[in-house]
Image (cartoon, rainbow, N blue to C red):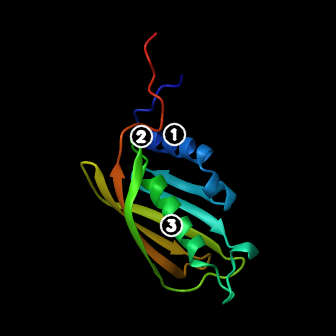
Amino acid sequence: MNKVPQDPQALAQACAQAMFARDQASQTLGMQIVKIAPGFARLQMSVSDTMIQGHQSCHGGYIFALADSTFAFACNTYNVVTVASGCSIEYIAPAKLGDVLTATAEEKARKGRTGTYDVRIENQNGQLIALFRGKSYSVRGTLLAEETPA
């Protein structure tokens, strides 16, 4: 069994790798982790033809999914299983077919079992597409298995 990293950056990266390996939703949508740090995550996703709705722009649910996944990776960087307790999104501009969306989640507050995270979603030109706020709640358990003595 691998030892759980003590360095905060190494721990954040190990947690992200463990989560992503089990995250079929993010993988199926083509999301990729760009950067991870304690309380921080950056993910990218390309807008494919199956994501286009009747107004010829990306369906908001896909943008929400990218923001929600990025939020999840940011709040799970401490090796404590953490889930969403609430979130909201404001759509600013449409994303179009072929756009590469980048979502950046930053921890704004974390105390006890709760946290607040802001996520900014931009296209490949730096145009703001949406703003998301997520509230997290830590539950029991860890992402990485603790090493047990022999």
Instruction: Note whether 121 is above or below 34 in the view shown.
Output: below
Q: Are marks 3 and 2 in contact (CB under 8 Å)?
A: no
The residue positioned 62% from the left and 75% from the top of the image is 124
Count every numbered label the image shows and give the total. Answer: 3
Q: Report which residue position mark 2 lands on.
A: 79
Residue 145: image location, x then y, percent: 48, 29
Please tell me which residue is depicted at 55% across the width and 41% down the height of the picture: 18
**Taking 148 as reference, is 135 above or below it?**
below
Which residue is situated farthest in the left direction here?
A: 112
Q: Residues within 10 Å of mark 2 (few under 14, many from 20)?
A: many
Which amino acid, by three-letter code, is at mark 1? Ala
Q: Quadrant of the N terminus?
A: top right
Q: Earlier in the sequence, mark 3 or mark 2?
A: 3
Q: Position of residue 72 (x, y in %)?
A: 47, 55
Task: Give the residue drawn at x 50%, y 66%.
Answer: 67
| Left or right: 52, with 119 as reference point | right
The dot on residue 14 is 1
- Tag 3 secondary structure: helix
Give the secondary structure at mark 2: loop
Q: Secondary structure at mark 1?
A: helix
> Residue 80 — which label?
none
Disc 2 to disc 1: CB gap under 8 Å: yes
Give residue 6's position: percent from left, percent from top. 40, 33
Residue at mark 3: 67
Q: Residue furthest right?
A: 49
